[in-house]
Image: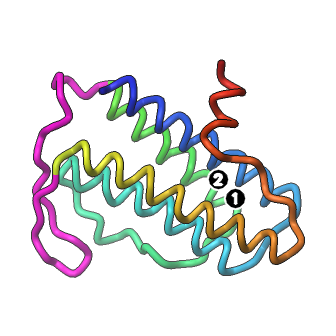
Amino acid sequence: MKDHFLGLFKYNDWANQKLLLCLQKNKVNEEQILTLYNHLIIAQNVWLNRINNISSRNLVLWETKKLLDLIELTHKSSEDWIKFLQEYNLTSFEEVIAYQNTKGQSYETGLTDIVIHVINHSTHHRAQIVHLLRSLDVEPPRIDYIFFCRENV
């Protein structure tokens, strides 16, 4: 399971990097795109904080940041997630994580479900960004999982 999740986060980072490169190359400064991308990365951080029982009060889920800041945040978030997964020492990912959502409601969720959610959440918002890029006549990168597999054989 660990190798599977590490592979998914490597894909997640690959897709994020491709998207960031596209935004840089095309000098995209569209507020909605930057806000969605920020949300994608900050949500990853919030979930890792929940797993590690760290407060996320200082993280703003919906704000617009500059592209250079998003590049830095992406690098750190990916690095932190991959390090967590590499160092995770239980044989299964069935550990239950107790946390509060942003509204203060308490939940308990299995680590497997959290990891899957984070990957799906990122994919969802990348798809929204791709749609917005097309509306700006910007050719988005090909970031489907199969393209990652083909590049990383």
Amino acid type at circle 1 is Leu
Q: State the residue lying farthest toward the front.
A: 146
Q: Is residue 150 above or below residue 44?
A: above
Q: In this view, does 112 lie above or below 148?
A: below
Local secondary structure at mark 2: helix
Crowd rating for badge 2 (residues with CA inside 10 Å; few <14, some 14–19, many 20+): some
Q: Mark 2 points at which residue?
A: 71
Residue 62 image position (x, y, % from top left): 48, 78
Residue at (87% x, 55% y) in the render: 25
Q: What stretch is highlighted in magenta?
A: 87-109
- 25 relative position to 151: left or right: right
Q: Do the residues labelled 2 and 1 touch (CB within 8 Å)?
A: yes
Q: Can you say which quadrant of the picture contains the N terminus?
A: top left
Residue 78 image position (x, y, % from top left): 49, 42
Residue at (52% x, 62% y) in the render: 124
Residue at (25% x, 42% y) in the render: 112
Amino acid type at circle 2 is Ile
Crowd rating for badge 1 (residues with CA inside 10 Å; few <14, some 14–19, many 20+): few
Q: Name the residue under label 1.
A: 68
- 124 relative position to 52: left or right: right
Local secondary structure at mark 1: helix
Q: Which of 75 and 14 is in front in this view?
A: 14
Q: Residue 12 carries which label?
A: none
Residue at (31% x, 56% y) in the render: 47
- Choose top left, top right, bottom left or bottom right for residue 3: top left
Q: Can you say which quadrant of the picture contains the C terminus?
A: top right
